[in-house]
């Protein structure tokens, strides 16, 4: 299994508080991703990173920011959490190779509840 | 933007029987990749099978195979000899050749009946 660790695994917090989720990988993969999973929507991309300090927005990036200061760590921050951000969050990694796109490997997810 | 559609929210199959999960996608690109992921109740996302768009031969992984119809933009998953452990959510996913962003379908929940 790909070495991906998400922390925390579960979190309950209140509306308006800041929240940071961490994704740590031991595979030295270039690409890292944050998704949210909600019933009826599948997985939707929030942000992704294609290298240290290189990030880009996904389809549901509003209200979220990310940072990647080291290859192995990708942080997702909710500056002021809202109830609509209650979800399961997945981190994924992949390593592109010239002419051959690799599949993504996923962490075990973080269940975030915002009351 | 690419879209991926899984029109079957839920499916059921008798143990040892065969079931096919459908997936269609919309794209104007010619270079892309398609994947099926499985998500059991444990919530892990597990890669089941992948298909490169430039390959005409359908991918096969043990009891799992795909029917890839490029002109119809269809990518269905066939599970043969279904087992209880196959019960899960199945997601179809698309990735364009030049990028690493992935678009997922909304999933099909598969129930396996003993």
Image (tube, rainbow, N blue to C red):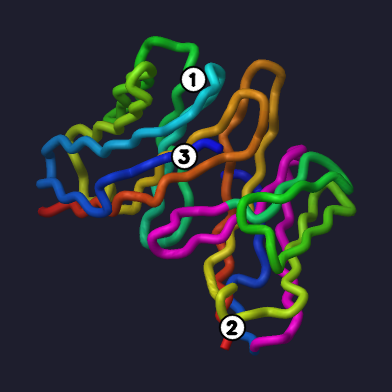
| Chain of the residue where label 2 is placed in the rendered structure | A
At 43% from the left and 40% from the top, the residue drawn is: B4
**Range of residues picked out in magenta:** A15-44
Measured in 3D between alpha carbons, the distance from the residue under mark 3 to the one under mark 1, in whole angstroms, is: 17 Å
Instruction: Please rate how many residues cluster around mark 3, counting C-alpha atoms within 10 Å: few if below 14, some from 14 to 19, many from 20.
Output: few
- Same subunit, labels 2 and 1: the answer reads no
Element type where label 2 sits in the image? strand
Which callout, 3 or 1, points at the residue further toward the start of the chain?
3
A43 to the left or right of B8: right
B83 to the left or right of B14: right
Residue B12, position as x, y percentages in the image: 16, 50
The residue that label 2 is drawn on is A114
Measured in 3D between alpha carbons, the distance from the residue under mark 2 to the one under mark 3, in whole angstroms, is: 29 Å
| Chain of the residue where label 1 is placed in the rendered structure | B
Closer to the camera in the image, A111 or A18: A18
Q: Main secondary structure of the magenta part?
A: strand
| Chain of the residue where label 3 is placed in the rendered structure | B
Closer to the camera in the image, A79 or B85: A79
At 41% from the left and 37% from the top, the residue drawn is: B36
Element type where label 1 sits in the image? strand
Residue A80, position as x, y percentages in the image: 73, 79
Element type where label 3 sits in the image? strand
The residue that label 3 is drawn on is B3
A26 to the left or right of B41: right
The label shown at residue B52 is 1
Q: Looking at the rendering, in which quadrant would you find the N terminus of chain B?
A: top right
Nearer to us of marks 3 and 1 is: 3
Q: Please say if A82 is above or below A77.
A: below
- Same subunit, labels 2 and 3: the answer reads no
Whether residues under marks 2 and 3 lie with C-beta atoms below 8 angstroms apart, the answer is no
The question of residue A28 being in magenta is answered with yes
């Amino acid at each position: 299994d790909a070495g991906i660790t998400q922390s925390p695994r579960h979190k309950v917090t209140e509306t308006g508080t800041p929240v940071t989720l961490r994704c740590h990988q031991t595979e030295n993969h270039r690409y890292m991703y944050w998704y949210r999973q909600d019933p009826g929507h599948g997985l939707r991309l929030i942000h992704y990173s294609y290298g240290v300090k290189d990030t880009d927005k996904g389809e549901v990036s509003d209200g979220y920011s990310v940072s990647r200061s080291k290859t192995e760590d990708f942080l997702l921050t909710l500056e002021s959490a809202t109830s609509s951000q209650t979800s399961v969050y997945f981190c994924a990694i992949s390593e592109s190779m010239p002419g051959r796109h690799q599949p993504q490997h996923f962490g075990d997810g973080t269940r975030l509840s915002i009351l | 933007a690419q879209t991926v559609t899984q029109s079957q929210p839920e499916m059921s199959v008798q143990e040892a029987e065969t079931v096919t999960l459908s997936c269609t996608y919309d794209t104007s690109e010619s270079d892309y990749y398609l994947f099926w992921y499985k998500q059991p109740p444990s919530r892990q996302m597990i890669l089941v099978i992948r298909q490169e768009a430039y390959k005409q031969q359908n991918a096969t992984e043990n009891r799992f195979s795909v029917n890839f119809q490029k002109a119809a933009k269809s990518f269905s998953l066939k599970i043969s000899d279904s087992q209880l452990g196959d019960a899960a959510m199945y997601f179809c996913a698309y990735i364009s050749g030049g990028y690493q962003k992935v678009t997922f379908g909304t999933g099909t929940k598969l129930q396996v009946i003993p």
